[in-house]
Image (spheres, rainbow, N blue to C red):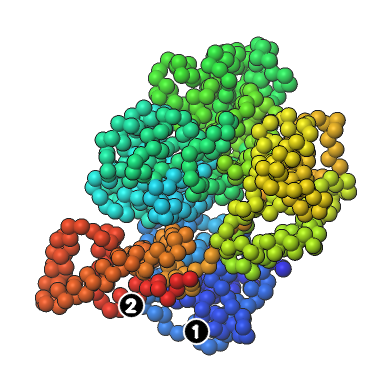
Amino acid sequence: MARIDIGSTGFQAVKSQAAEIVRRLGSVNRASAVLTSVAGGNNSIYPNRLHALLGEERTKTVNSRTFELIKVALANLEQAGEFSQPEKPEAVEFTRALAERWKTSSRTTEELNRFAKELSQPVGVIRHTLNVSGVLTQFPEVGHGSSAELPATSPENRPGAEKPKQPDFSFQDDAVSKCLAVFRRDPKRKAGLVVPTGGGKTDIALRVAVATLKERSDANARVIWVTHRRALRDQARDRLQVMLGRHVKGLTPEDIRLFGDQIEFVMLKDLDAAISNIGSGLRLIIIDEAHHAAAVSYDPAFELDPSVPVLALTATPNRTDGLPIRIDEIAFSITFRELTERGVILRPVIERFPIENFDWSDDAIDRLAGHILAGGGERYHKVLVIAPQVEKVVRIHDLIKKRLADEDASFFAPEDVHYISAHGNSSGTSNEAFLAEFRQKENAIIVSAQLLLEGYDDPLVDTVVITYRTESVIMLMQAAGRCVRYSPGKKNAYVIQAADERIAYFFDHRWLYQDLSDFPRPQLFDYAFTDPEDRERQVRELLARQSIPTARVEELILEVNTLPLSSEFQLLFAGEPYYGKPVDFDHLGRWHVCLMTPNTRAPYVDVYNGLCALGRRAAEINVDNLIRTTASSHGIVESKSPSSNWILLFSLALSLQKALMEVHDIDRTHYHPGGRVRPENRATSWLKYVCFRHSPKLAQAILDFTAEAINAEAVREDIIRNPGRYAALVRQPLPIGGYEVFCLAQSEFDYLVNVRNELIARLNSVSGAMRWADYRAWLLSQSSLILPVRVYDYLGFLTRREDWDTNLLNLKPYET
């Protein structure tokens, strides 16, 4: 369907009117209901369509049909005189308060986006409201030039300066919500947080820690943050201090100051003692760089009785040795590619290592030095060279300096070249002092071994040189991650490496933690469905795109429709040979497909992971014995039916062998790609792994009640993941606008009803002037807190009938 040009005059006029309706009514949901009522026919204008219109995200466009529908509804409202009606006091106050806040802000795009998130309004509504108030000038609409009023002193506002894309860290809110939801669902759960280097997993985990402590407000409660390196411990402490000086969604500076003191940062060797000292007050253990957690030294965290929740942080959960890092589930995961799309990190330019057969001779190192120096200034500015052993670090450093001395002119100066290792550094100072000084340099070359792969964050590093091949994907991705961090004005990142396609693959795909092996690099896709009809529709469309025969499609649909709605399942596609034109491969290539459910996945996993366990040898063996052994162990009998488990196991094994040949360059004399087209991210063209999960809809009343809450996503996720757990929702209004919502279990709801009735009776017995003092006295008398602390702060207002009716939602009518 055709999409609308967001820069067109007609688009901007409709957008402005839609924003005005939202401003007057106070929320997108209310505007959606009003517009639907005047749209005519059976047409509906859903809130997500208005968000797309008003959100100013170029990735969320509006199709022509929706645009025309909104346009007609707005015209009908205008004809009915809606725009000429006096504004409600709430709209007037919202506009006034926002204008005053804008006047005292830095007036940047970042501030505009922050206001939108805090007030749960689309950016377009905030922009429009500031225009209406008259405080926003020279702030053009998206699609018409500059997108922010930048202060004159801002580097981005200097003449000729290119305005960098502002990073979007909003995914961190989702990550915090999902981690907390896991622990609310099961307080003994061990959850993984998988966020690539530069994505802010330390900040996310600190927010989870503070929120966990805040929920119970117990002075004896503690969170342990454990790490194996001093630099990582100090980094986490420093980030907590940084959080005190900036806005953090869902937490006040006082929350961070108060509960941050209850986070204990400990070294791994001190973990056992820290657990013993804290005793029953331990609420959460956070493990930094958790891919190390397979080691026995982490046992105290996982073998506690009674158990406590564990949050395991890592950018790379899969170990080279295949050992699990002892988590029950991954609470949140995001890929490098998603972070680059959000502007959080840069997608690196991956360059092949410039010297073939690098043998560590003086001549080879000299040529490497020449390559780095030649690119200085034009491409490379701050370079990190990773060597495999400490003894090679000093050699590379010395030879780079020697080559630099022979250069007639160079971007780098001799004092820009340094080295660091566990044994010391080129400055002769402590390593901590050396790194602090190095961070201040804009242009430099530093040579290191593995010391800087963990716990060293310098956003100015824009180039990483990996001088060796490694079997460790963790090490490879950590090294590449050193140069991709966002920094204002930083335009490019470069990874110079020995030939290895894994960086390109893992930048685009999530990790298949303890599931299928990622050794053959399957293409990964994730789908979410809302109901049985949506599930069937998505499966049908996917199968049609893979040219699956009609009879097989109907077989699969029949099987899928028998699955419980909450059941996750996967479709594993194994490619058949293709010899047509490459341009036709996407729609003419044929596939076998295996439906993997909790009851059917075991034989497929055994064959898949069994072959991958053989490494490169798997591409050359006869798979007959493996298939027969696997089939026998799972009660699968030999069959010639194309869709039988027997044939599917063979098809999977043969396709997997082709995938290994393709991605690992094995046995090229027997590998014939034909017309297959390999994806640019260097995944295989032979395997696709598609995961389906249920993402249920909530009742509209719940969506409306939480629409303007700062913690809406967390609350909705909690309700979805824990059906029947909560009896009511209560929301507390926040200054200027928005709410914070709290979920109450049945016992908490009953307590709230009873204590409210008691409080009403108590306050009615004293004069109006004394009620506030009596209420505060009652609050101070509460020795044990049944409800969240913030609900007590608002309980006095809940004695008012209008507040009780407006800000409490009984969930009983909406149970499914």
Q: Between residue 644 and residue 745, name the one nearer to us.
A: 644
Q: Are marks 1 and 2 in contact (CB under 8 Å)?
A: no
Q: Residue at x 72, y 30 (%)?
A: 616
> Disc 1 to disc 2, how far (Cα)?
28 Å
Label placed on residue 398? none
Residue named by callout 1: 82
Q: Between residue 423 and residue 150, name the one nearer to us.
A: 423
Question: Which badge, 1 or 2, comes first in the chain's sequence?
Answer: 1
Residue 405 drawn above or below residue 579 = above
Q: Between residue 118 and residue 273, name the one nearer to us.
A: 273
Residue named by callout 2: 805
Can residue 553 be seen from the camera position used here? yes
Q: Residue at x 42, y 22 (%)?
A: 431
Q: Position of residue 538 (x, y in %)?
A: 67, 63
Question: At numbered mark 2, what does the secondary structure look like: helix, strand or loop?
Answer: helix
Residue 658 drawn above or below residue 719 = above
Q: Residues within 10 Å of mark 2 (few under 14, many from 20)?
A: few
Question: At numbered mark 1, what does the secondary structure look like: helix, strand or loop?
Answer: helix
User: The disc labelled 2 sits on which kind of residue?
Assistant: Asp
The quarter of the picture where residue 370 lies is top right
Q: Residue at x 53, y 21 (%)?
A: 449
Q: Position of residue 788 (x, y in %)?
A: 29, 59
User: The disc labelled 1 sits on which kind of residue?
Assistant: Glu
Q: Is residue 30 left or right of residue 300?
A: right
Q: Is residue 88 left or right of residue 511?
A: left
Q: Position of residue 56 (x, y in %)?
A: 56, 62
Q: Residue at x 63, y 23 (%)?
A: 467
Q: Given this view, does label 1 or label 2 mark the residue nearer the observer?
A: 2
Can residue 731 be seen from the camera position used here? no
